[in-house]
Image: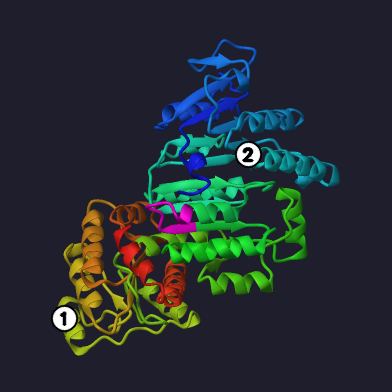
Amino acid sequence: MTALDTLLAPASVAVVGASDNPHKVGGRPLRYLLDQGNAGRVYAVNPRQSAVQGLKAHASLEALPEVPDVAVLCVAAEQAEEQLALAARLGVHHALLFASGYAEIGAEGLARQQRLRAVARDGGVRLLGPNTIGIASFDSGAVLSFASIYADHAPADGAVAIVSQSGAFGVSAYALLRERGLGVRCVAATGNEADLSCADFVDALARRPGVRLLLLYLEGVPDGARLQRALHAARAHGVVVVAVRAAHSAAGRRSAHWHTGSGGAADARLDAMFAAAGCRTVSHLDELVASVPLYLDPAARAQAMPPRVAIVSNSGASCVLAADAAERLRLPLAELDADTRGMLDALLPAFSLNRNPIDLTAMLLADPALLGRVMAAVLADPGVDAAVLGLLAIGGPSYDVPRFAREARAAALAHGRPLAVHSPHAQVRAAFAREGCAVYGHEVEALQALAGHAAHRQVLLPTAAWNEDLQDA
C-alpha cells in the first residue's frame, strides 16, 4: 500500500467544472471515467446544471453524498485556490489541477503556485499539478485526464508505466507503445510539481504489482534526495527505469523554465545518481519507445557485452549497411561455428554473402520455409548473442510475412536470443510486432537498440529479481 493508491485506483472521483461536452477539459475526464472501466463512483460538480453526461450534477464538493478520494479541478486559475482549499477542508485525499499560469510564467505565477502548495500541505491533500494533463491508470480505469489521445488509442493494461513532467511527451510515448501493440499500466504527467513530483510516482508505481518497466521524462529535479530514494526503490522491486533527461544546454534550461518552471535534469550530479541506481538514460522519445520491446522480451536474456551479432537479410545492401553500422557501434559480428556454416551452406546458394552477414537472396521468394530454418540455425549457434533481421522489398502474396514472423520469433524464444527486426515497410514491422518482436525502421536503429539494451542488462545483472520478473511480464 502506498500513499498514492487512492489516486491510482480511487473508490470515488468528483469532476469539478464537469461539462456536457466530452471534448472540453471539463468533459473529457468525465467521459473517460464513464467509458473506460473505472470501478469507482463518479460525481459531476456543476452549479449551473441539473445533469451532466447523464449524471446528476451537484452544486459543489460540499453537496456530494460522500467525500471523494480524488477531486479533478477543471477550473481556471482564478478559482483553483478556493476549490483546493474546499477539497482540503472536506478531507479529499488527492486533487488534480489542469490550469496553467503558475511558475512557468514568472514571479507572479510562482507566488500563486506557492500558495497552492501551502493550501495543499496545510490541508493534507496531495496535489497533482498545476499545468498537468492528469493521470491515467488503465488497470483501475481511473483516467483522470483531458488528453484526447486516450480516445484515439484504445487502452490496454501492461507492464509499462510512464512518468513525465511533460504531458505531450508522456501521452506520445503511450500512443507509440499502443501502436506497437504494447500495453501500458499508467501515464502520470506531473506538470509544475507544486506538490506531487515524478519521484513520488516512480516510487508508487515501482511498488505496484505488474509494473516491470518505467519510462521517465524529466526537465528538473527539485528534490534530488527524494528522486534518488525512488530510483533505488524501483531497482529493489525489480523495475527497470529508462529515462530521457532534458535541458542540457542553456537554451534547453530556458525552455524548460517556461514549460514547467523547471531548471534542467542533466548535470553531472544527476548522471552519477542515475548510474548508481542502475537507470539508463536515452536521448529522445523514439529511442525511449524503441527500447521497450527488448526489455519485455523473454527471449532477450543476459548476454555478453558487447553482444556478438548475427546479421540476416534478404537484401545484400542491407547486409553491407548493417555490417558498417555494427563496426561504428563497436558490435562484433559473431563467428559462426562449423556446424552452423554447414547448415547455411546447405540452405543458401554459394553466391550469397559470406556467412555473417547472411544474405537470404531471392531464394526467400521461392522458399517460404527458408527464413525460419536460417534463423533457427543462426540463433542456436553458441557464438551468437543476438541477431538482426532485415526484410526489404517484401510485399504482395508471394511473401508469407506472417509465417516469417512466427518462425523467426519461435527461433528466438527457443534459443533465448534477442532478435531485432528492421524493415522500411510498415506492414512487415506490424506483422513481426504482433508476434512480440522488437521492430525498427532501419539497420542502425536495430543495432543501437541491441547495443543499449545489452549494456544496460550488464549493469542490472546483480539485481536477480529484475532478470526473473521480466521473464514473467
The residue identified by callout 2 is: 125
Instruction: Give the numbered dot on residue 343.
Output: 1
In the figure, residue 75 lies in which quadrant?
top right
Q: Check disc 2 and give the amino acid type.
A: Val
Q: Residue at x 67, y 60 (%)?
A: 223
Asked whether 8 or 145 is in front, the reply is: 8
Please identify, in this view, whether the residue under mark 1 or under mark 2 is nearer the observer.
2
Question: Dot 1: within a 10 Å radius of its alpha carbon, few (fewer than 14), some, or many (20 or more) residues?
Answer: some
Question: Dot 2: within a 10 Å radius of its alpha carbon, few (fewer than 14), some, or many (20 or more) residues?
Answer: many
Q: Check disc 1 and give the amino acid type.
A: Met
In the figure, residue 339 lies in which quadrant?
bottom left
Q: CA distance from mark 1 to mark 2?
A: 67 Å
Provide residue 6's location: percent of width, then percent of height: 49, 40
Kindly state the secondary structure of the residue where label 1 is placed: helix
Provide residue 49's location: percent of width, then percent of height: 60, 11
Provide residue 48's location: percent of width, then percent of height: 64, 12
The overriding secondary structure of the stretch rendered in magenta is: loop
Instruction: Give the numbered dot on residue 363.
Output: none
